[in-house]
Image (tube, rainbow, N blue to C red):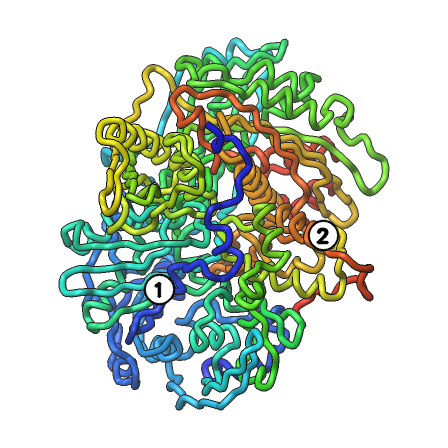
Amino acid sequence: MSAVGKGTPRIDAVSRVSGAATYSGDVRLPNMLHARVLRSPHPHARIIAIRTAKALALAGVRGILTHQNCGVAWSSGDSRNIRYLFNNPVRFAGDAVAAVAAISPYVAEDALQLIEVEYEELPFVLEAEAALAAGAVAVQPGGNLSPDDKGVREPETYRRGDVAQGFAASYRVFEDRYTSAHVNNAQMERRVSLAAWDGGRLTVYASTQGISNCQRDLAADLKLPVENVRVVCQFMGGGFGNKNQSHDFDLMAALLARETGAPVRIELTRKEDYVAVHGRWPTTQYYKVGVASDGTLKAIQLRGYSGMGPHRKGSGAISGPELYQCPHVETTVSPVYTNTAVAANYRAPSFPQGVFAIESLMDVVASELAIDPLEFRLKNVTRKYQDEVPYTSYGLEECLRRGAAAFDWKTRRRPNAADAGPVKRGCGMAMASFHSRVGRSSAVVRLDGAGRYWVHVGVTDVGGGAKTTMALIAADALDVPLEAITVVSGDTDRCPYSVGESGSRTTNFTGQAVIEAAKDLRRQMADKGRPTGDAVLIGSATPDPKIEKAVRHSFAAHFVEVAVDVELGSMRVLKYVAAHDSGRIVNPLTAASQVRGGVTMGLGMALHEQLLYDRRSGIPLNAGYYGARVMTHMDAPEIEVIFVETEDQYGPFGAKTLGEPPIIPSVAAVANAFFNATGRRIKDLPMSRERILEALA
Amino acid sequence: MSDVSRREFLESTAAAVTAAAALPALPAELGASAQAAAVVRTPVTLTVNGRQHRVEIEDRSTLAEAIRDQLGLTGTKIGCDRGECGACTVLLDGSPIYACSYLAVWANGSRVETVEGLAQRGGLHPLQKSFIEHDAPQCGFCTSGQLMSAKALLAVNPHPSADQVRSALTGNLCRCSNYNHYVRAVVAAGAATPGPPGPAALTGEPR
């Protein structure tokens, strides 16, 4: 075994640096048409009339879809309500009203301006708590508290112990309120889909994190047999959770292609990407923590509200309490409908905003009890999931210790507000405990007569390096050099089912399938010998890995030093150490990229990013990279990465999950560093200039 | 906005960067009365990666669209189409520009370099090799733009410091946020280049 564990450049790296990589938006088909989408300018309105005659009369326009001629529902767009491709009423500024296919994107765009829509504007609500108030306008029939999966309209609740008893037994009780903003995934590649029909068979060149899931969803919504849908995605330009399933514009492209008899390509604008797809759910969190005089946690209570936009596309959950051992815990979280952009999955969907709140309050507790934040965490940190279920492997304590040592926490961190001048330095830390989702995958390994191993896996490689990871795992499982492997991926006609690249599952589940398929092939080779000439041997596997009486978590502890300029209201990161337990690291080179990227995204969420709304009109104000102030080269600090390599018995070659955890602790760590620098606490994200100046006033 | 054509809009905001925020929020905000203008095409000569092309280009086409759709060089990506992200960065007569915010007809007679022109006679450019070794691209969508900005930097500053690289490439966003690796890759490519320091510090700003 030699490939796993060695830093290896990506097997497709030359394509990525030469312009040769074919992303779905680079695919061109003969006679293809271009589609654009008309979107609601109102946050909530009933469509009284749509007139498309003028647009249809424009030279070059080939087809128009509206709610009047298209009743197709988009099943993965909402798990609780029927969400059509075109809804009436429209429920957020950016809701699709019509889609036009034409001979060029320009003509399609011109045609949008010729569609006449009469709206009856309706009252709207932008914030989750306001949406639950008596008399608030109903965003969806039945009310604004989104029901659970059994249809019951109650907050999602978790309890262990009895918090009332825990608070009664506490030496001190701390309470506070924290809020987080809607931030966008904002991957570089805009959303794009190219659909073409061959008789009754549909091919979609999609930009998707999961070709298999996309295929399944498209087939269901178009009422086609699954085998009549082919989804292709050879390279994809990022998604961070917003390209998990099929999307409404995939369906629009397919329907327009069927109607016009020509392939149809839809590419959303950057602005549409911000307002019409989805971002991270904003939260309001009320926390109450009880603690003994020695700093031992007694009770944790969370009452949270998540603003989901008008559809339940994501869970709306709020993570955080899983970080601590504590006898009495109660969380009640309400996912709420609002007339804002839809909120759903974005890298560790429920985590960075939740961890920001609980790790901020724990920092307050430690400070008030005059306990070092690191010691406080070492005392109270989780050692069993929910104090009950063992972890399959556990490296969180070691992340805390090794991270702190590399950061030089004991000497670098000084008392709160220690600097007298206008630039104040301070240190903060925070943790992550991430439960990767479960799933299944298949793999096929084909050995040909020339001695080449073809690994067929339905991964798309969202940027994490899944193709390379699969090749490394296959090389070691087959005990052959990496050069003998070709990975075939990103095409449902050529690859078996793979869990989508979401929930940080690919290495675990598709990797395990590759190992099992390799075993199958090696058994056959032992039996029949190596194939020669035109003969092949094919190994395959669909393992169903189960974890008995344990849960698999990845862990992290982050340490950051910031400099706050109290006159300018600016905050800059001076030093950053990220220690991660993701089990054995399959490829340290790409794994370090994952950590640095995730941390940097988290810094953007901490410091800058927010989709702002005009309260009077309900219209988003700053959609786009400039407005959202995403991190740039100039903003990004150097990040030191430490891997605490536990051996996980359930993962492929001991590996655990890595993609999502790095973004989790960074937001809270920065908030805590600001507190250490200034003695003041910012409880609302982002910690932008105006918030910094307000906190210091 | 309804009577402002795409070309007039771009021309009136040569620094499309600062004007991006003024773009209409949504197509529906545009007036409903605009008529599709008759398509105007202009013959243009472009020398792209050393090869001369004579093409008829719609006046409203951007250079990025012409490169991708008419010349078929899809290595140049369009991430925002509004001068914010730098994915479309190409070199125009040696200087980096945002090709999404530059009309193709303006490039008539100019020399354009794209990512496809970096490798010579089958050998990768030192920057490309360094990008691979340092795992600079994650999803890879911003990579072409990062490479072209880096090439422009090395032309004037062959051995840049990390801070100089950050400054020169700051117009190239990477949402995978692999900035540390991009910076290291460019610094390393510069350090590996023989020869004296360049004449000037840096000019990495898109013009």
Which of A398/B18 is in front? A398
Whether tag 2 and tag 1 are in contact, CB under 8 A, the answer is no
The residue that label 2 is drawn on is: B192
Residue B125 in the image, given as x and y percentages of width and height: 61, 60
Instruction: Work out whether disc 2 and disc 1 sit on a shared chain.
Output: no
Q: In which quarter of the view is residue A170 placed?
A: top right
Q: Chain of mark 1?
A: A
| Local secondary structure at mark 2 | loop
Residue A578 in the image, given as x and y percentages of width and height: 61, 32
Disc 1 marks a residue whose amino acid type is Glu
Q: In which quarter of the view is residue B168 placed?
A: bottom right
Which of A316/B166 is in front? B166
Vertical side of A657 occupied by A20: above or below? below
| Label 1 CA crowd tier, 10 Å (few <14, some 14–19, many 20+) | some
Disc 2 marks a residue whose amino acid type is Ala
The residue lying at 53 percent from left, 44 percent from top is A9
Residue A103 in the image, given as x and y percentages of width and height: 32, 78
The residue lying at 40 percent from left, 84 percent from top is B34
Q: Is residue A604 visible?
A: no
Residue A336 in the image, given as x and y percentages of width and height: 37, 42
Residue A628's disc is: none
Residue A121's disc is: 1
| Local secondary structure at mark 1 | strand
- Judge from the rendering whether residue A105 lies leftward or rightward of residue A446; answer left or right: right
